[in-house]
């Protein structure tokens, strides 16, 4: 890709911040649009190739200014979570941000002739919660814009992404350890000396994708010279793990016993088995995942140990 001006919405978050790191390393000019300026983004403020704009994808005054003259858009801004999208957020707000926000990104890309929009989506599941419904809907809208409005869109479909920086900081809770995601929760709760709550029987399965593999997939989707408009590419290795498998693997990697407490399934979730066919990933993007679960967890554990130690000593 000759031109290197990229807009990353939601670029201050877990996956977004890793992607921004990589793009800046490769001398892309990166503009991040996000509602919060995380510590993982602040450190780039002195880089002349980096620009941060605090704001919302729903702001009609900001988005056109940022989309203009961009060569690519990576759209990650969304309200995340399964049960959280029922219990924490208003359903209308989830739909507004995730669906209407995505449509506005696609409209801006069309108006300013942005050559390509790349965005993540979630596995096809039958869960009745606002997050899952909105992600499946935005996938269809992206294909509509590709077919009818000549906006080249590539959707990357992931299972559960994990790795350093995976966290959801709810500032109103006053703690950086208000985690909602499985692997950080297991590590932090164990360090606290608490049992880990397992929803259901722990046999629900998903693909677990290490964040560095996720970043590589995005970079390849941004760079490819193929016209992959409308494609939905699964990023996985055709192998899934149960929650119980994750805990057992963590115990081996960490050499630590993890106490478990089984509780009822959360709202908006049902027992399921998620596996992703990686054929398109190999055929269209020429990539096979490099990080297996053991190596990914070994890279992840020290990050949370250090984060917990820093917080405990603060």
Image: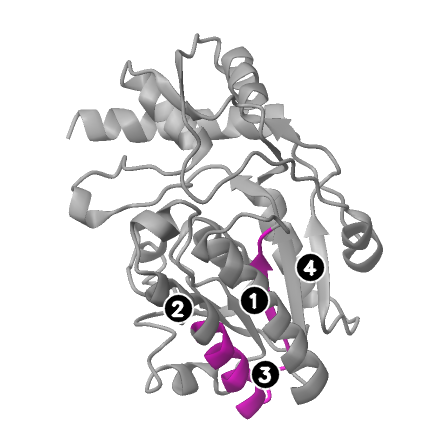
Question: SS at mark 2?
Answer: helix
Q: Hey, which quadrant is residue 120 in on the image?
A: bottom right
Whether residue 222 is visible here, answered yes or no, is no
Dot 4 or dot 1: first in sequence order is 1
- Residue at 31% x, 18% y: name it: 191
- Give the side of residue 273 with respect to residue 254, left or right: right
- Residue at 72% x, 33% y: name it: 239
Dot 4 or dot 2: first in sequence order is 2
Question: SS at mark 4?
Answer: helix
Is the C-beta separation of discs 3 and 4 under 8 Å? Answer: no
Query: x, y (%) of residue 55?
Result: 30, 72
Is the C-beta separation of discs 4 and 2 under 8 Å? Answer: no
> What mark, if any, has residue 114 been given in the picture?
3
Q: CA distance from mark 2 to mark 3?
A: 21 Å
Per the image, the residue denoted by label 4 is 220
Query: x, y (%) of residue 6?
Result: 52, 72
Q: Which image quarter holds the C terminus?
A: top left
Query: x, y (%) of residue 166?
Result: 42, 41
Query: x, y (%) of residue 129?
Result: 46, 52
Dot 2 or dot 3: first in sequence order is 2
The magenta stretch spans residue 178: no
Dot 3 or dot 4: first in sequence order is 3
Residue placed most toward the observer, 295 or 3: 295
Per the image, the residue denoted by label 2 is 97
Question: SS at mark 3?
Answer: loop
Q: CA distance from mark 3 to mark 1?
A: 22 Å
* Residue 301 versus residue 139 in the image, above or below: above
Is the C-beta separation of discs 1 and 2 under 8 Å? Answer: no
Magenta region: which residues?
101-122
Per the image, the residue denoted by label 1 is 137
Q: Which image quarter holds the N terminus?
A: bottom right
């Amino acid at each position: 890709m000759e031109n290197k001006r990229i807009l990353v919405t939601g670029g201050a978050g877990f996956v977004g911040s890793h992607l921004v790191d990589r793009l800046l390393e490769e001398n892309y000019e990166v503009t991040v649009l996000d509602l919060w300026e995380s510590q993982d983004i602040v450190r780039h403020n002195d880089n002349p190739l980096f620009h941060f704009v605090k704001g919302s994808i729903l702001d009609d005054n900001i988005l056109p200014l940022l989309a203009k003259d961009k060569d690519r858009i990576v759209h990650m801004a969304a309200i995340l979570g399964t049960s959280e999208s029922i219990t924490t957020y208003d359903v209308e707000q989830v739909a507004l941000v995730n669906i209407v926000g995505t449509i506005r990104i696609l409209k801006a890309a069309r108006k300013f002739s942005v050559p390509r929009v790349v965005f993540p989506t979630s596995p096809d599941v039958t869960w009745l919660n606002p997050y899952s419904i909105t992600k499946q809907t935005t996938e269809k809208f992206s294909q509509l814009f590709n077919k009818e409005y000549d906006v080249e869109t590539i959707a990357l479909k992931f299972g559960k992404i994990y790795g350093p920086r995976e966290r959801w900081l709810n500032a109103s809770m006053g703690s950086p350890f208000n985690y909602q995601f499985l692997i950080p929760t297991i590590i932090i709760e164990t360090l606290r000396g608490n049992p880990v709550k397992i929803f259901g029987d722990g046999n629900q399965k998903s693909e677990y994708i290490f964040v560095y593999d996720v970043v590589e997939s995005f970079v390849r989707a941004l760079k490819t010279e193929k016209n992959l408009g409308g494609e939905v590419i699964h990023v996985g290795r055709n192998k899934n793990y149960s929650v119980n498998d994750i805990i057992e693997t963590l115990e081996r990697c960490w050499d630590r016993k993890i106490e478990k407490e089984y509780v009822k399934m959360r709202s908006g979730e049902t027992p399921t088995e998620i596996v992703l066919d990686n054929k398109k990933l190999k055929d269209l993007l020429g990539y096979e995942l490099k990080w297996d679960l053991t190596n990914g967890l070994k890279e992840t554990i020290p990050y949370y140990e250090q984060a917990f130690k820093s917080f405990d000593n603060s």
